[in-house]
Amino acid sequence: MSEPTREPYGSEDAARAAIIDAARRMNALGINSGRAGNVSMRWHRGGADGLLVTPSALAYEAMTVDDLVWLPVEAPAGEDAGAEQPLRCDGTRQPSSEWRLHRDLYASRGDAGAIVHAHAPFSTTLACLPRIHVEGIPAFHYMIAVAGGDDIRCAPYAMFGTAALSAAARTALEGRRACLLAQHGLVALSGTLEAALELAVEVELLARIYWQALQVGEPARLDAAAMASVHARFARYRPDPTG
Ligand code: 13P
């Protein structure tokens, strides 16, 4: 996957404001509600690769740029693998309980410039079904390709905010830009905040259509050859889907 496209934020405060705006838009767009979910952006400080993330359990409407938290992508030496809080972070609030999921994805995915985690209603509905746990959302529609493969996987359930959930999400995202989290929600990553938000909306629409189709019958599936053609065409139609 390609390197992330850097967004032209002139200052860290501008980047922080864009993250809050994206978090509020998640709710306005109907892909999240209340304080659920979290949003982050890769943000270097000096020579250190890092990320800015929304704080934990704070209403997005009340959030200001000073509430966001910066932490380094590289785990500091001596940090407990099961720690609830990062050993090193910079902010007056606690970072999102999913800081590890965000940090681990930036560490392992060079193409990740921004990450959106939402409790999107149709994605979460599907993520409660055993058939989805097993096979994810299959290629019932060609737009499944926007998530990077021939399906959108569902990471097995793990407690929110844990290293186990982070590991499960990383596995489900291999070769993909989005996945479901069992009994939880969705994760979308992309090169930019705008693209990550757009992808989360697209995944939620696919989940809704798949859910609708399941109400009236067993949806047909596109085979591997058909999806290979879609991926090839996407390379021309949307040459940089991560940007
Ligand atoms: P935070 O408010 O701690 O980000 O938690 C919300 C959430 O969705 C946890 O998965």
Image (spheres, rainbow, N blue to C red):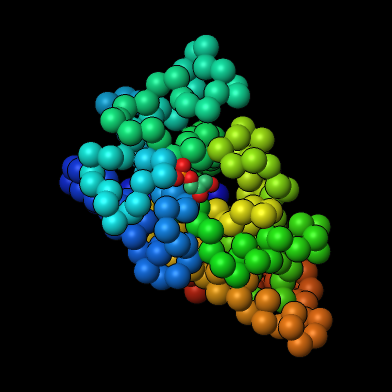
Q: Residue furthest top?
A: 78
Q: Compared to 67, does 240 lie above or below?
A: below
Is 145 placed left or right of 118 in the picture?
right
Is 140 placed left or right of 116 in the picture?
right
Is 13 placed left or right of 181 in the picture?
left
Residue beneath the point at 75% across and 80% down: 214
Is 2 placed left or right of 47 in the picture?
right
* Camera sees residue 4: no
| Residue 211 percent across, percent down from the top left | 68, 76
Q: Compared to 85, does 122 lie above or below?
A: below
Looking at the rendering, which quadrant does residue 141 occupy?
A: bottom right
| Residue 9 percent across, percent down from the top left | 23, 48
Q: Residue furthest bottom?
A: 216
Counting every numbered tag in the picture gives 0
Q: Compared to 14, does 235 lie above or below?
A: below
Residue beneath the point at 38% across and 33% down: 94
Q: Which one is nearer the viewer's eye here, 175 or 183?
A: 183
Residue beneath the point at 75% across and 63% down: 129
